[in-house]
Image (cartoon, rainbow, N blue to C red):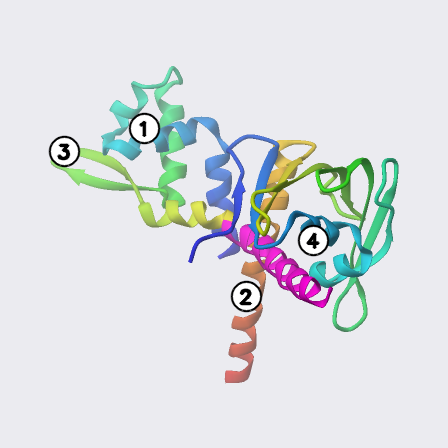
Amino acid sequence: MERKTKVNAEDGKQDLMITREFDLPLELLFKAYVEPEIVEQWMGTKVLKLESKKHGSWQIETSDNKGNLAFRANGVIHEFVPNRKITRTFEMENTPFGVQLEFYEFEQLTDDISKLTMHVIYESVAHRDQVLKLPFAFGINMAHNRLQDIVSKLK
Amino acid sequence: MMNLRRDVFQAIADPTRRAILLLVASQSMTAGAIASNFDTARPTVSKHLQILTKCELLKQEQNGREIYYHLNPQKIKEIADFIEPFREMWDDRFNKLETIMKKYKTKK
C-alpha cells in the first residue's frame, strides 16, 4: 500500500514537512480544519476555542479514558486565507517542547483530490527531535507495559 | 532497552560520528584509514569508534593483523525507523479526517 502521509525531517534542521493527499475536494479538507465539531472528531480532542480568522486564537484539550486531563494545547492564528492557507502557533501546555510555528497550505489537485502541506518550525533542532521521538518513546513504553502485563499474568 | 536506544541517538548526535558512519557505509575500513580522513587527533577518532562499536552501529572484523570496521545495517535500520511512529500517528489522524469528511460529503 502506498504511503499517503509523508514526513520529511532532515538531519540537523529545526523544521519538518508533513504532506498528505486526500481523496476529498479542497473545500471539504479545509472545512475539517475550521469547524470545531469536525476537528474534535478527527483529532480525538475537545475544542475549547477555535477562532478561524487573523489574530484569532485556539485551545484544545484531551482527557484520558478515566476523564483525567491528559493534554492541553493552544496557539494563535496569524494568517487565515480560506481554502488556501493557515499560519498558526502551537504550544503544548506544561511541557518543555516550546512553541512551534505551523504553516498549512491547502491545494486542489483535481475536483476530488486535495493536498495538505504542513511546514512546522521548532525553536531548535533539539526541540524538533524531542517532538519527533515522542511517539517513538511512547511506543517503547507501551511495548514495555504490554510486556509487564504479560509477565504479571504469568505469575 | 530504553537506555540502549537513547545511547544510539546520542551516538549519532555527534557530527564526527555521523561522518564516520557515512565513510564506513561504502566500505569496511581500519581505524587508521578512518582517522586519516579527519583532522582530529587519532585518540579522539578511536574514542568515537569505541562509542559507535559499543552501541552496535559499527561492527569489528578481524582480517589478518588488521581490524576492520563496518556498518551494522540492522542497527542503522532501527534509527531510520524512529520517525515511523510519528508518521503513523499523523497517518492515522489524516485517515480519520478523510473518512469523516467523505461521510460529510454524502450527507450534504
Looking at numbered disc 2 in the image, what kind of residue is underneath it?
His
Residue beneath disc 2: A144
Q: Which residues lie in the magenta part? A: B84-108
Helix, strand or loop: magenta stretch: helix
Mark 2 vs mark 3: tell me if same chain.
no
Tag 1: residue type?
Answer: Leu
User: Reading the chain from its start, which is encountered first: label 2 or label 4?
Assistant: 4
Please report contact status of discs 3 and 4: CB closer than 8 Å, yes or no: no
Secondary structure beneath dot 4 equals helix
Residue at the spot 42% in from the left edge and 31% down from the top edge: B18
Q: Secondary structure at mark 2?
A: helix
Q: Quadrant of residue B47?
A: top left
* C-alpha gap between disc 1 and disc 3: 22 Å
- Identify the residue at image location x=30%, y=34%: B25
The foreground one among B74 and A22 is A22
**Given contact means CB atoms under 8 Å apart, are the residues at marks 1 and 4 in contact?**
no
Instruction: Tell me, yes or no, whether dots 1 and 3 are on the same chain.
Output: yes
